[in-house]
Image (cartoon, grey):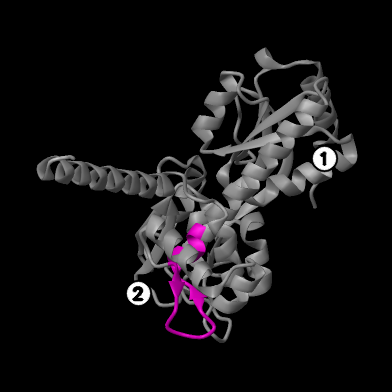
Amino acid sequence: MLKTGTRLREIQLCVQCYERMTLCKFRITFEFMDIFLFRDLERLNQTGNFSQAAELSNLSQPAFSRRIKTLETWVGAQLVDRSRQPVKLTSAGSQILEAGLQALARIEQERRHIRESLSLPDKYVVTFGTQHSLGWRFFPTWLHAFEDAYGPILSRMRADDLPSCLRDLRDGLVDFVVAYTRPEDRSELDAVSIGRDRLIAVCKPEPNGAPLFDFENPSVAMPLLRFGNAAPIGRHLDHVLNALDGAPRLQTVYENSMGGALRIRARAGDGVAWLPESLVAADLSAGVLVRTGKPEWSVDLDIRLMRDTRHANQFTQDIWSFLEVRQSVSLVS
């Protein structure tokens, strides 16, 4: 027979052990977050209804609601406005959904590339480094057109800020870098032109379709959503913004090095942003964003593919030679 004190001590140890296991499980849940929660949020965004979204996810409504709440807890913000029907995503919900779907697409793409590389070990995987703004819209379209003209290749994309992309190019971690430049800019690296774009001023429309911020009243300060200092693309706007510093005066209300983040804030009505036309073309067609200001406030951009010849191989040289010949005729209309 165990003494009462010894038995009580054993019970206390068991309780402490259970508490530690429970806490550990809780920490693991949030450190290794279920990435497919973004799919649940996408279905909720599409249906505007918890019951319908739960059915699409093959879950009960309570279980589905708990998954959305888990994602909100992980993000640390309310992602869904439940005060109306159909429910709508908050600004934070839209932002994290877009980022989450981009991450899922990247993971699935890398998984496909790995499987293809393993099944075809003799094929070289071409790695492209791209600025964030180019990686969202332009690059996938360009790559599809390139493969139609050149032939299928195994490739992967690494989206990052331009300084990081150029560092990876120098270190041989990527084969090519796709970046925005001005037509008059010169590069120390080998470069070929693969497209054109322009920075245009956009904002959310009024219900009647007119720009929410129209620059007509010189006494009204205009909220500006601008690229941060880490984004070289923002420097292409300096001469335009300096010319507009008089009337009406622009007031920076938000900065981010990613064009996608500025696009979300512009769609939410937080201010005016100069963004690549290729990035917002679908939003302009859908009427989610409209152009504002004067046409001459746009900034022409050249899209160039750059390489470091020290890390070239025969396959990447063949690609380069093909693009050198074709650079006078854009692959993307």
Residue 180: in sight, yes or no?
yes
Give the residue number, with chain letter if any, for mark 1.
146
| Percent x, y of residue 23 | 31, 47
10 Å crowding of disc 1: few (<14), some (14-19), many (20+): many
Q: Are marks 2 and 1 in contact (CB under 8 Å)?
A: no
In the image, is 46 to the left or to the right of 83?
right
Between 98 and 85, the residue placed more toward the observer is 85
In the image, residue 315 lies at what x, y percent? 81, 21
Residue for badge 2: 220
Residue 85: % across, % down: 51, 85
The part of the chain drawn in magenta is 79-96
Say if residue 330 shows up in the picture.
no
Numbered mark located on residue 235 in the image: none
Q: Amino acid at mark 1?
A: Phe
Compared with 169, 8 (above or below) is: below
Task: Name the quadrant containing residue 291.
Answer: bottom right
Q: Which mark is in front, 2 or 1?
A: 1
Residue 89 on the magenta span: yes
Which residue appears at 73% of the width and 39% of the height? 112
